[in-house]
């Protein structure tokens, strides 16, 4: 023991302070970058008796000894302020002769720091890993969210719509968010359950959200209110841009980009006339049944009661009643009418034979 003490003294005199095998090199005294937090005195080598082997029985039971070690460990790790302790790990203790001491805190580096520096308001989520079972306590969820909101400068509930998964990860909330299946909206709704949240206004909607018709219908009713729609006919003015400008782009993709399909799905009890929209669904007019549907609707619209009445219909009548797109597929409106009105062509042929008044020439107004 005398020889060991002599060697230690010689090392201090020459400035060649080394440590026992397995420990990191000692920090030289006087280096500004290695000064401990809050100007705490530097721990001298002769005070760090844990570097010489097993400490005396009961040594770690003394709070001043535990604090002495933490001060020394902070010097070793280049910790300059309380915030730097957030990067501490259990390996830092084990690799610096503190494994035995760590048992005093049930092998928790976080508990060691919090117990040693009780004057600081520690945020457990800012450590590399929160304490075991920390997030199982819902009170900690609320505590984190309150701090998180203040940190992001959130003042109104609607400000939460701009929060993303990355914001959680960058602020120690990655593990916390796992309790909500990594869904931002679920975490926020749990924190503020009384607010009328619109899931589509978040950066991402919850997984499977659009699979439920009630959610799709909720969105459509909200969209109609946003656009100032007051009657069913107002919906005919709906466009793809209305979805894209109002958080509905993902929903619209579900319908192949068709607002008509979205309305038919969300309001199935209403009879929709596709031709009254700004654009009919792709391929709509190539289906003869759709053409016939339109002609039947046009007949009611124009008050047509007989085949003779159809002979009075002019091209301008179709153009004035949403039939322009359909007309583009035919050489004339008469070709369209004879194809879609049963018996019309035969009626005209009979009139030709009997000398009855004939229809006007193809293409006439």
Image: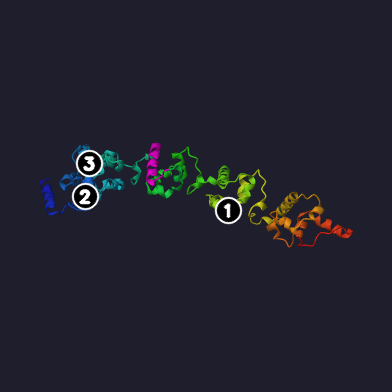
Q: Where 58 falls versus 80 (above or below)?
A: above
Q: Residues within 10 Å of mark 3 (few under 14, many from 20)?
A: some
Residue at mark 1? 240
Main SS of the magenta segment?
A: helix
Mark 2 / mark 1, whichever is N-terminal: 2
Magenta residues, start to end: 136-155
Disc 2 vs disc 3: which is toward the camera? 2
- Find the distance from the CA under tag 3 to the CA under tag 1: 65 Å
Disc 2 vs disc 1: which is toward the camera? 1
The x, y position of residue 301, in whole percent, is 73, 49
The answer to whether marks 3 and 1 mark residues whose Cβ atoms lie closer than 8 Å is no
Write the residue at 39% across / 48% down: 169
How many dots with numbers? 3
Judged from this view, the residue extending furthest toward the right is: 354
Q: Secondary structure at mark 3?
A: helix
The x, y position of residue 32, in whole percent, is 20, 52
Q: Secondary structure at mark 1?
A: helix
Mark 3 / mark 1, whichever is N-terminal: 3
Residue at mark 2? 35
């Amino acid at each position: 023991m005398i020889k060991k003490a002599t060697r230690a003294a010689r090392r201090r005199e020459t400035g060649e302070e080394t440590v026992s095998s397995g420990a990191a090199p000692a920090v030289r005294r006087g280096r500004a970058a290695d000064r401990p937090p809050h100007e705490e005195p530097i721990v001298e080598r002769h005070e760090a008796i844990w570097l010489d082997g097993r400490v005396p029985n009961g040594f770690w039971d003394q709070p001043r000894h535990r604090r002495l070690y933490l001060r020394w460990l902070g010097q070793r790790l280049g910790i300059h302020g309380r915030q730097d302790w957030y990067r501490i790990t259990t390996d830092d203790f084990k690799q610096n002769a503190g494994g035995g001491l760590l048992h005093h805190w049930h092998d928790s580096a976080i508990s060691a720091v919090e117990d040693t520096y009780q004057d600081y308001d520690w945020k457990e989520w800012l450590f590399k890993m929160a304490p075991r079972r920390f997030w199982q306590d819902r009170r900690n969820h609320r505590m984190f969210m309150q701090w998180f909101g203040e940190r992001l400068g959130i003042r109104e509930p609607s400000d939460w719509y701009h929060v993303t998964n990355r914001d959680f990860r960058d602020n120690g909330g990655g593990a916390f968010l796992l309790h909500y299946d990594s869904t931002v909206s679920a975490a926020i709704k749990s924190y503020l359950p009384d607010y009328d949240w619109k899931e589509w206004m978040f950066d991402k909607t919850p997984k499977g959200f659009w699979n439920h018709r009630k959610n799709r219908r909720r969105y459509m009713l909200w969209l109609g209110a946003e656009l100032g729609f007051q009657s069913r006919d107002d919906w005919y003015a709906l466009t793809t841009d209305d979805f894209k400008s109002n958080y509905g782009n993902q929903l619209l993709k579900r319908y192949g980009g068709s607002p008509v399909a979205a309305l038919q799905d969300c309001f199935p009890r209403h009879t929709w006339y596709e031709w009254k929209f700004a654009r009919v669904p792709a391929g709509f007019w190539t289906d003869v049944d759709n053409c016939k549907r339109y002609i039947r609707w046009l007949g009611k619209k124009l008050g047509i009661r007989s085949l003779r009445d159809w002979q009075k219909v002019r091209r301008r009548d179709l153009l004035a009643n949403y039939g322009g797109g359909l007309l583009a597929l035919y050489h004339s409106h008469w070709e369209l009418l004879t194809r879609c009105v049963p018996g019309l062509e035969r009626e005209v042929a009979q009139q030709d034979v009997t000398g009855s008044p004939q229809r006007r020439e193809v293409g006439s107004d």
